[in-house]
């Protein structure tokens, strides 16, 4: 707990579902532990997936980090799900004219500002952690945003058509080429970014956002030391299912789960993370009302599995889901 009696909260998150959930956590914390300035006394640390990152046209892109920053700042494109609202694409048209970059991957003009700033700072020697702190300081986000690692560990996908960067598989092929495996070159030699392990050790609650278990939460847990820190944490660990009634809440998580042999079912993903009581990662696994019939078996296997409404339609439903997770982790 902080000196004010409000908790320290850590969220592991990636993707659009992750950014919506993080916005919900900030709002739920504001409601339950308000401060005098309209914010929260709770300390929220978001550990973001950087497996989606890529180099394109000489620029370093960090899609999940940017999704978090834009969503928390309220400047995200909620229709499209990624990038900035009010975006234009003049530079992208020029890049296509020059035959540069990927024609299927659009860099918006406003978004490019972040990529240019980030790449410049990285080239000047700043770490990924420092770059994110600088980007995040533009708006009062109300959370501390950390990358999972400072190392470059971009996700690659192996298919029958060959091995490619995750973003090519995801955006060009819309995850339609059956994936045989995912890999993160060098991740086994990476270390958690500064502050990650300390935040987890000090946390009163650790939440797994309803993010893709394979390519969003998966890479975070694959950074050596992070899964062990979850297992050893003194705080309560609550995961939120990204699968409702056999389908991903958003995105193409089913294609990723199939590649690693996990059925796209809330109970299967819960088993994949596992109960801390039996050597896994979670104390509690929140599943949707649509999946209520799956709860009893998971409970019998030792994983506490409450049933709640999981759909994040707007700020209020996202905040209510986050409040449910926080109420379970930190009962009043
Ligand atoms: N997703 C798309 O479907 N098409 C795009 O052209 C595209 C461009 C893009 C540019 C910057 C960025 O940060 C994200 C972008 N995304 C695009 C989203 C991204 O590919 C994925 O949805 C996430 O990485 C998955 O979490």
Image (cartoon, rainbow, N blue to C red):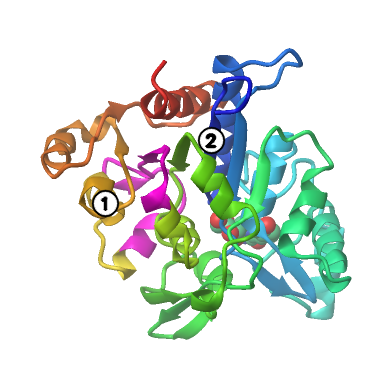
Residue behind label 2 places its C-beta within 8 angstroms of ligand 1 = no
Q: Residue at x 33, y 70 (%)?
A: 259
Which mark is in front, 1 or 2? Answer: 2
Say if 288 sits above or below 332 in the image.
below
Indicate the position of residue 233 as horizontal and vertical percent values. 42, 46
Indicate the position of residue 285 as horizontal and vertical percent values. 30, 39
Outermost residue on the front side: it is: 3
Location of ligand 1 given as a quarter of the image: bottom right
Q: Which residues are magenta?
A: 230-257
Indicate the position of residue 6 as horizontal and vertical percent values. 57, 23
Decide if residue 228 is on the left or right side of residue 269: right
Quadrant of residue 244 in the image?
top left
Indicate the position of residue 327 as horizontal and vertical percent values. 41, 22
Q: Secondary structure at mark 1?
A: loop
Outermost residue on the top side: it is: 36
Within 10 Å of the Cα at label 1, are there few (<14), some (14-19), or many (20+) other Cα atoms?
Answer: many
The residue that label 2 is drawn on is 9
Decide if residue 241 is on the left or right side of residue 74: left
The N terminus is located in which quarter? Answer: top right
Say if 67 sits above or below 97 in the image.
above
Within 10 Å of the Cα at label 2, are there few (<14), some (14-19), or many (20+) other Cα atoms?
Answer: many
Q: Secondary structure at mark 2?
A: strand
- Is residue 252 visible to the viewer in this orientation of the structure? no
Q: Residue at x 57, y 46 (%)?
A: 199
Q: Nearer the viewer, residue 165 or 232?
A: 232
- In reply to whether residue 235 is colored magenta, the answer given is yes
Quadrant of residue 326 in the image?
top left
Q: Residue at x 53, y 21 (%)?
A: 316
The residue that label 1 is drawn on is 274
């Amino acid at each position: 707990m902080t000196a004010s009696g409000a908790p320290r909260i850590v969220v592991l998150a990636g993707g659009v579902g992750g950014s919506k959930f993080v916005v919900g956590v900030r709002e739920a914390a504001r409601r339950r532990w308000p401060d005098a300035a309209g914010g929260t006394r709770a300390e929220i640390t978001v550990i973001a997936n950087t497996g989606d990152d890529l180099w394109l046209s000489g620029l370093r892109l960090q899609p999940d980090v940017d999704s978090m920053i834009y969503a928390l700042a309220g400047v995200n494109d909620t229709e499209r799900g990624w990038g900035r609202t009010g975006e234009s694409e003049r530079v992208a048209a020029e890049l296509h004219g020059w035959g540069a970059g990927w024609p299927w991957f659009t860099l918006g003009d406003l978004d490019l500002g972040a990529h240019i700033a980030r790449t410049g700072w990285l080239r000047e020697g700043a770490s990924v952690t420092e770059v994110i702190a600088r980007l995040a300081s533009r708006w009062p986000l109300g959370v501390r945003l950390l990358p999972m690692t400072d190392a470059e560990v971009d996700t690659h996908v192996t298919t029958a058509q060959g091995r490619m960067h995750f973003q090519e598989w995801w955006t060009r092929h819309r995850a339609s080429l059956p994936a045989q495996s995912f890999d993160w070159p060098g991740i086994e030699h990476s270390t958690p970014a500064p502050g990650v392990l300390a935040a987890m050790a000090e946390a009163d609650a650790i939440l797994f956002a309803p993010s893709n278990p394979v390519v969003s939460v998966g890479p975070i847990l694959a950074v050596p030391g992070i899964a062990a820190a979850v297992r050893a944490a003194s705080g309560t660990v609550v995961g939120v299912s990204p699968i409702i009634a056999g389908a991903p809440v958003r995105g193409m998580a089913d294609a990723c789960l199939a590649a690693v042999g996990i059925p796209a079912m809330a109970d299967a993903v819960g088993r994949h993370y596992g109960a801390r009581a039996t050597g896994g990662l979670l104390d509690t696994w929140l599943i949707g009302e649509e999946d209520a019939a799956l709860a009893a078996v998971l409970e019998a296997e030792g994983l506490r599995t409450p049933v709640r409404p999981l759909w994040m339609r707007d700020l209020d439903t996202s905040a209510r889901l986050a409040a449910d997770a926080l109420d379970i982790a930190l009962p009043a």
